[in-house]
Image (tube, rainbow, N blue to C red):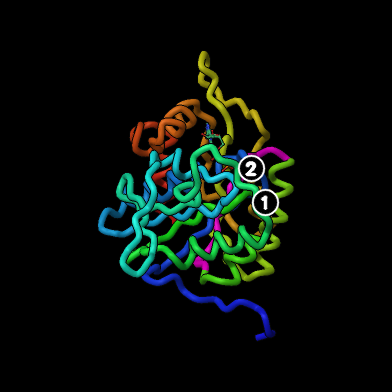
Amino acid sequence: MARGLPKVKPITGVKHIVLVASGKGGVGKSTTAVNLATSLKLIQPEKNIGLLDTDVFGPSIPLMMNLHDTPFLTKDNLMEPLVNYGVKCMSMGFLIAEGAPVIWRGLMVMQALEKLLRQVYWDSIDYLIVDTPPGTGDTHLSLVQNIPISGVILVTTPQSAAIEVTKRGAVMFQKLKVPIIGIIENMSGVKCPTCSSNIELFGKDVSALAKEIGTEVLQKIPLQQEITTSSDKGVPIVIARPDCEEAIAFRNFGKKV
Ligand code: ADP
């Protein structure tokens, strides 16, 4: 190995690491990560599920998982994850004052990431779902170079602009030899409240992209106001409305991972 390159090292106690990534922000990446983690716990309650938020500048997990405390330290100075809905969570948002802006240079971000990867007492985790920042940048590269990744799930809306950047992200992961598990097509349409027909708000679908990058569309999740409202209250839709179409879609997706 070339001098200076970091070495891939497992996270103590963690079996499988799955990244959730997107080309651009606002497409529902964190929503997907949160609902995937909680779905996995609902589907396989005997498994230990972790959720790691590596978006240092815009952490969403504290709000979406309704976790606002500061983690305790173990006697070995490791941070104890906070737990809700049976999912162990860690986020930079637990360590900085709520609402405070993070104005850090690259090196500080990398140090923060190192803390999140190596200084957490996960104990025993079967699946660690990692919510990544939007785009493809230093954080993604560092994750891939430092920890063994089982695969990545790409989240996109069917809008051309989002699909285009998702493709770039896919190429990056392929170059880094990270298996692409599949694509989540989020906000894939909205149901007309009067006639119930599907309105393709952002475009038709992402199947052409899936074909091009040699993967599959794992699930299509419609645009639904309740996803936003429950998410803002810190309750993932799979918990808030387990029987609704969108929650079932997220659970089906969990079964495929
Ligand atoms: P990202 O992580 O890609 O930036 P988020 O998961 O934070 O995106 O989602 C952005 C906003 O869109 C949030 O307010 C979220 O609640 C909302 N949202 C995500 N997916 C859906 C959906 N399918 N229907 C309705 N609102 C959604």
Work out whether 38 lies above or below 121: above
Q: Is residue 154 above or below residue 107?
A: above
Instruction: Judge whether residue 157 can be spotted in this image.
Output: yes
Residue 174 percent location from the top left of the image: 66, 66
Ligand 1 closer than 8 Å to the CB at disc 2? yes
According to the picture, the residue beneath numbered tag 2 turns out to be 25
- Residue 144, image x and y in percent? 59, 68
> 256 and 211: which one is in front?
256
Q: Which residues are magenta?
A: 149-160
Q: Secondary structure at mark 2?
A: loop
Residue found at x 40% / y 72%: 12
Left or right of 63 on screen, residue 58: right
Residue at the spot of label 1: 135
- Magenta stretch contains residue 95: no
How far apart are the alpha carbons under marks 2 and 1? 7 Å
Quadrant hosting residue 109 = bottom right
Residue appearing at x 50%, y 76% in the figure: 9
- Quadrant in the picture for residue 127: bottom left
Q: Is residue 145 left or right of residue 14?
A: right
Report ligand 1 position as a quadrant.
top right
Q: Which mark is residue 64?
A: none
User: In x, y percent, where is residue 203?
Assistant: 68, 34
Is residue 249 depicted above or below 135 in this figure? above
On the question of residue 20 being in view, the answer is no
Task: Kindly check if marks 2 and 1 are in contact, taking CB atoms under 8 A apart as contact.
Answer: yes
Q: Residue at x 34, y 55 (%)?
A: 72
**Amino acid type at mark 1:** Gly
Mark nearer the N terminus (2 vs 1) = 2
Dot 2 amino acid type: Gly
- Image quadrant for the N terminus? bottom right
Residue 159 part of the magenta-drawn span: yes
Element at badge 1? loop
